[in-house]
Amino acid sequence: MQLIKRIYRNNLLAISIGLVYLWFGTLKFFPHLSPAEGLAKDTIDQLSFGFIPPDISILLLALLEVGIGLFLVLNLFRKTIIIIALFHMAFTFTPLILFSEQSFNYAPIVPTLLGQYIGKNLIIVGALLSLLPEKKRISA
């Protein structure tokens, strides 16, 4: 019974995270719908040293996010997708450094709405880490 509860809880958590990824990723396919569009384009521009054009970068990000979402919802390649999502999450925190003036009213304790939008990713990171399968123990 405990195992069934744990599996149910983990699937519900993965589906919830997947739906958030699907929702936010889908918005990025439509210009000016995502509140994070400008920041995402600027961040990718900085991280890629201007190599990826903004209109292409936002589409690539949308594909990545929708892909992560679909795979989590459908429970496919969970460990691999969680690792990819964790790398994605790591990059979502870079605007706090690259664009701190947009992220904080008074750094580092009073975030703007944009900073709060980024900060909520801490919860997603924790949830993703809790979904990683535990290593099997070898008993002697």
Image (tube, rainbow, N blue to C red):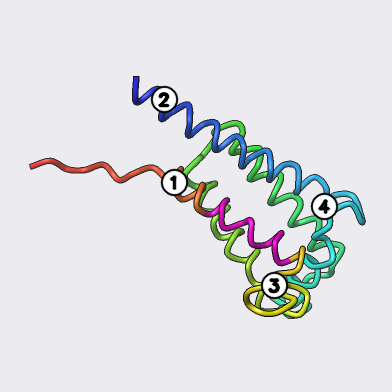
Question: Crowdedness of circle 2 by 10 Å Cα count: few (<14), some, many (20+)?
Answer: few
Report the magenta stretch's main SS.
Answer: helix
Q: Are marks 1 and 4 in contact (CB under 8 Å)?
A: no
Mark 4 element type: loop
Residue topped by disc 4 = 28
Residue topped by disc 3 = 95
Residue topped by disc 1 = 130
**Among the 4 quarters of the image, the one containing residue 93:** bottom right
Mark 2 element type: helix
Give the Cα separation between the discs numbered 2 and 1.
15 Å
**Among the 4 quarters of the image, the one containing residue 32:** bottom right
Give the Cα separation between the discs numbered 1 and 3.
25 Å
Q: Disc 1 or 4, which lies upstream in sequence?
A: 4
Residue topped by disc 2 = 5
| Above or below: residue 40 compared with residue 72 | below
Q: Nearer the viewer, residue 63 or 129?
A: 129
Give yes or no for residue 118 being in the magenta stretch: yes
Q: Which residues are magenta?
A: 115-125
**Quadrant of the rendering where the C terminus is positioned:** top left
Mark 1 element type: helix
Q: Disc 2 or 4, which lies upstream in sequence?
A: 2
Give the Cα separation between the discs numbered 2 and 4.
35 Å
Give the mark toward the camera: 4 or 3: 3
The amino acid marked with disc number 4 is Lys
Which residue does the image show at 75% across and 48% down from the upper left?
25
The amino acid marked with disc number 2 is Lys
